[in-house]
Amino acid sequence: MTTHVINNRRVAGASGECIDVLDPSDGQVFAQIARGTAHDIGVAVAAARRAADGGAWSRLAPVERGRLLRKLGDAIAAHHDELALLEQRDCGKPVKQARADATACARYFEFYSGACDKLHGDTIPYTPGFAVMTWYEPHGVTGHIIPWNYPMQIFGRSVGGALAAGNACVVKPAEDACLSLLRIAELAAECGFPEGALNIVTGYGHEAGQALADAPGIDHISFTGSARVGTIIAQSAAKRHVQVTLELGGKSPHIVFADADLDAALPVIINAIVQNAGQTCSAGSRLLVQASVYERVLAAVGERIATLRVGPAAMDLDVGPLIRASQLERVRAFLAPYRQGGAAGRLVAQGRIVPEAPAGGFYAAPTLIADVAADAPLACDEVFGPVLAAMPFSDEADAVRLANVTDYGLVAGVWTENGGRGLRMARALKSGQVFVNNYGAGGGVELPFGGVKSSGYGREKGFEALYGFSVMKTVVVRYGGQ
Ligand code: NAP
Ligand code: MG
């Protein structure tokens, strides 16, 4: 059984119970992880507290902290293939995607390693005889709850930023996707991270995850996951007045105007919904197209979707399996009304599951549905599968209205050759990120990322994340005289 990593050591859970780990490509059990309890979380939080409160981690100069982060980034890069293979098996990621995730994870540590000694405060002109300065200090111990869709990437961006700011971390990965992160924690120990700086406890969300959110020794929580669980986490944190970063879901639109460069737009639009089998918070899951080119765009997108092939991760096709059976059921439930003709809308195109795909795997064919009603679940709710919902709009105002109508506001893509319109749209869209004539939240560790509305609050990625992982202290010194 794979165990937790606490204080740089592999630790078996107190309960001795474990959870089966499935390979989404064939649905078979291939490993087991520890089923963490509140007790295990308590042990990890205590370890992190010792590291943060005067322990070796807290005494490191920022430049030394940066060197350790850099070492870990290099170690992740050096173990790239091993980590990618773990992620491929654990999450059903096609080879290229798994490798891209390992590369991105290393890149986060590289980026944040250089930021450790550049997070500085300010001095403030005040009354004569006073000196005022602001300091950024770590919260202390940060808790990180990670989803299964991009474990390595989200670990890198969240834990990388928190460590850079000087916090000690306790991480609870999703029970479906732990293996790569446990290996990275081992690598951190080998790199010389002080005990307690980075701890990982595996287990179920409602057990270990909830215990982490409720743990009295946690000073800040970074949660990435669904809006439903985000609410639970925020409520837990509110009881103890602990700050939270919520990176939640999305229903992100691509907005295609008649003057768009379609040759440039189409491959990006397809990739944004099929990447990671659509299980991406920033998936471009809505396609809003100006009426005059609507049918032309539908035909072109449909043609490409029909060529896509779905199969086992190791075959490295266009699309791999979904994470688990319940996710496949969820995708099917969204599509059922369109298959049965019960909902307004038409099924334009679907990709193909290859015959080599094992029957026990969790495969969903990429699907394009057109004329989806703006208030239909498929237009408003996050599917988290490779399903693209298209609808026409008349003009800029109509596009803004449709784009902003959902509860979410994570990412938006605007396709137009009119520069002024691109900027007007960027201003009008209620979204944490707006891409004009490109799209892709995954790229760019430098780019602050996060949502508005039900997509959450706070920002990760980029230098901006370091402010969220720090507390500002204002120091006022009266020195007298003039
Ligand atoms: P989820 O069900 O909300 O789970 C997210 C994490 O929370 C998992 O580690 C889960 O553990 C844990 N959890 C569940 N219940 C909990 C509780 N009561 N207390 C504490 N932790 C709990 O989401 P998911 O299905 O894993 O991930 C998909 C969602 O994440 C989508 O909505 C997606 O949009 C969002 N997401 C957002 C971003 C972003 O940056 N904005 C990035 C990626 C994903 P278990 O899985 O072990 O139960
Ligand atoms: Mg798995």
Image (cartoon, rainbow, N blue to C red):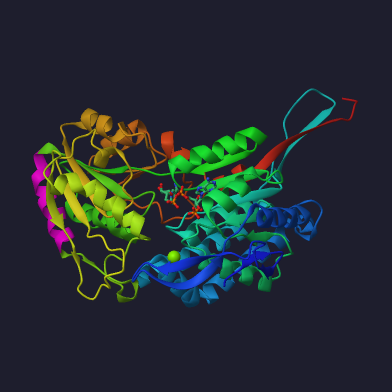
Judge whether 116 appears above or below 2 on screen.
above
User: How many marks are shown on the rendered structure?
Assistant: 0
Q: Quadrant of the N terminus?
A: bottom right
Whether residue 302 is in magenta: the answer is yes
Quadrant in which residue 305 is drawn: bottom left
Image location (x, y in percent) of residue 201:
61, 59
Image location (x, y in percent) of residue 196:
72, 60
Q: Quadrant of the C terminus?
A: top right
Residue most toward the top? 127
Q: Is residue 392 left or right of residue 85?
A: left
Whether residue 236 is in magenta: the answer is no
Q: Is residue 387 left or right of residue 440?
A: left
Image location (x, y in percent) of residue 234:
55, 37
Quadrant in which residue 320 is drawn: bottom left
Majority SS type along the magenta span: helix
Question: In this rendering, does residue 122 appear at all?
Answer: no
Toward the viewer: 169 or 227? Answer: 227
Quadrant in which residue 194 is drawn: bottom right
Judge whether 191 appears above or below 395 on screen.
below
Q: Residue at x 53, y 49 (%)?
A: 206
Judge whether 229 appears above or below 151 on screen.
above
Toward the viewer: 43 or 410? Answer: 43
Q: Is residue 216 left or right of residue 420?
A: right
Toward the viewer: 98 or 147? Answer: 147
Q: Is residue 88 left or right of residue 271?
A: right
Question: In this rendering, does residue 24 appear at all?
Answer: yes
Q: Residue at x 45, y 58 (%)?
A: 148
Image location (x, y in percent) of residue 438:
31, 51
Highlighted magenta segment, given as a residue range: 292-306
